[in-house]
Every structure is written in structure tokens, then in C-alpha cells.
Amino acid sequence: MPSTRPRGHGGTHPAERSREAVVLKIGGSVAGEDDAALDLVASLHDAGRPLVVVHGGGPLVGEWATRLGLETRFERGLRVTDGSTRDVALAVLAGLVNKTLVARLVAKGVPATGLSGVDGGMLRAEREDETLGLVGRVSMVDSSLLEELLAALRVPVVAPAALDGDGTILNVNGDTAAGAIAAAIAARLLAFVTDVPGVRGKDGRVIATLDRDRAKALVDDGTIEGGMLPKVEACLVAAQAGCRAAIVSARDIDAIEALLSGEAAGTVFEAAA
Ligand SMILES: Nc1ncnc2c1ncn2[C@@H]1O[C@H](COP(=O)(O)OP(=O)(O)OP(=O)(O)O)[C@@H](O)[C@H]1O
Ligand SMILES: [Mg+2]
């Protein structure tokens, strides 16, 4: 019997709905003053698309750390994190940034539900390396809470944080967390919604498609750097896991629908053959 369910609402089993899901990683910077990324979330939700929103907020963590007299240092785009910095990151990301995003989405009529990677034991991590301190690399995703929220037609908004084996809370990169979540729920699409229209090549023009070899060359010659590094790595990992993965501009309102219908937008990543 043909289904009359609206497209995008998936089946009745929680895991079916998450396989239709789009994981949107929105930057702390795009979630600032302007509403483009949030309007995108609202329009996709209104169209019946199951969504998981993952956010960053690095600059705001830095701002609060400075206000509190803590020094901030980055290595390979990752924050060096002692106990106090981890506390500030958690308070700012899972508190201020997460609740601000949820409040603004709720105001747009989206049933946004804020949580962090700690909640429900969603994200497990191993220490990245000694020099980075309380920074983890996501090693396991328990997606059951996300699947329950998606089945209840809610929009989970996830702040990056994870638990290590001892129950210590680790700071994790939001881009990496988004990639791991997309792979775990076998999402239809992982999209990084950011402040640039995609990955730019040496000539400054957006590169339509990237595979691991080409991306590596651009990392090695310094064309891809800073905040773009964890995004590119997360996209390559997700693409390898079978997800469509892309980096698009928050201003490109049609990008996500285009990507879902197999068309080009921003930079799309290809799995190795
Ligand atoms: N090759 C490149 N192409 C495009 N952007 C690049 C490239 N290399 C580095 N970048 C930088 O990456 C930035 C996007 O990453 P960034 O971490 O700043 O944003 P975000 O992750 O969306 O937000 P946030 O980290 O604040 O949550 C761009 O604004 C640009 O400065
Ligand atoms: Mg970033």
C-alpha cells in the first residue's frame, strides 16, 4: 500500500526517522547576531525534515575565558583546555550558547530541545593528547536519546561535550561531534553551515567537490587551515561512513534542499573509492 505520510516524516520506528535526518552543524559565529542559520533550521523543520542541530561557539568561550582572566591557546585549531577552561567551555556552550539557540528556535516555532553530548551518555571520548588537556576525541556515540527525540518530532540542539571512561567531562570539537553523530544515526546529510560559502582553493574560489587526497594536499600547503580543518576531516569521515557531507553558507537558503536532491551546493565531500 502506498504511504500517504508526508515526505520527510520517515517511518514509525525511531531509527527510520533518524536515517532521514539532516545533521546541521551551525557555527557559534553564524548563531550570533544574524538569523540566517536559524531560519534555515526553521524552514527545514517546517518542511517535515527530521533535524539534529549541533553547535559550536568557540569565540564566545574565548571571550568568557578572557573575561575571567584565563589564557586561551590553540593547537591545530583545537583549544588547549585545563580544568578552569573546560568549566568555562561547558558553561558557555551547554549553557549560554545552547539555551540562546533553543530560545531563538522556539521563538520561530521550532520544538528545539537543548542537550549536550553528556546527556544520556550520548558522546564518549578518549583524551586527544597530553598537550591539549581536557580535550577528547569522540570514540562512541549512543544515539538512543537523539532517536527518541526525533521520533517525538522534536529538534535536538546538541552542545559539544563528552564523557571519558571515568565520567570526566571533556571538551570536544563541535565539528567532530557533528560528524560522529551523523555517522552514528546514518543521517541522510551532514551539513556544516558556516560563514563562508564552502572550502576555498588557493585562488579563493569555492571547490565544488573534495576527496581525501585533494583535501590533504590543500591542508599540507596551508590553504585549508584553522576552523576549516576539523570540518573537512569530519566531512571526510562521514562521507566514508556513507553520509552525504557538505560545507555550505548560512546565507544559501536553498543549499540543504539542493544537497538532499543530489545537486551541488558549497563543497561536497566524496568517499575514497
Ligand atoms: N580553505 C578555506 N576555505 C574557506 N574557509 C577557510 C579555509 N581555511 C580556513 N578557513 C576559515 O574557516 C572559517 C570557518 O571555520 P570557523 O571555525 O571559523 O567557523 P564555525 O565552525 O562555523 O564557527 P565556530 O567555530 O565559531 O563555531 C572561515 O571563516 C575561514 O576563515
Ligand atoms: Mg569552528
Image (tube, grey):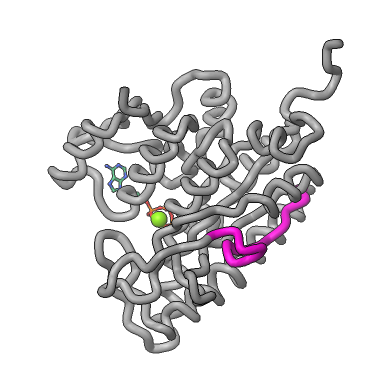
Which image quarter is the N terminus in?
top right
Residue placed furthest toward the left = 221
Residue 109 at x, y percent in the picture: 79, 48
User: Closer to the camera, 123 or 30?
Assistant: 123
Residue 66 magenta-highlighted: no
Frontmost residue, 49 versus 137: 137
Please provide percent x and percent y for residue 155: 71, 48
Residue occupying the point 71% across, 35% down: 17
Horizontal and vertical percent for residue 89?
48, 74
Answer above or below: position of 38 versus 244: below
Of the 4 image quadrants, the one containing the C terminus is top left
The reply, left or right, for residue 240 in relation to residue 200 is right
Question: Looking at the image, is 145 positioned above or below residue 5?
Answer: below
Q: Which residue is pictured at 43% across the width and 85% down the height?
A: 84
Q: Please say whether residue 43 is visible from this viewpoint.
A: no
Residue 235 in sight from this viewpoint: yes
154 vs 135, left or right, is right
Could you say which quadrant of the image residue 36 lies in? top right
Which residue is found at the position 56% from the left and 76% from the top? 91
User: x, y (%) of residue 131?
Assistant: 26, 74
Q: Residue at x 45, y 57 (%)?
A: 138
Whether residue 245 sits left or right of residue 233 in the image: it is: right
Toward the bottom, the furthest residue is 69
Segment colored magenta = 110-123
99 is higher (above) or lower (below) than 177: below
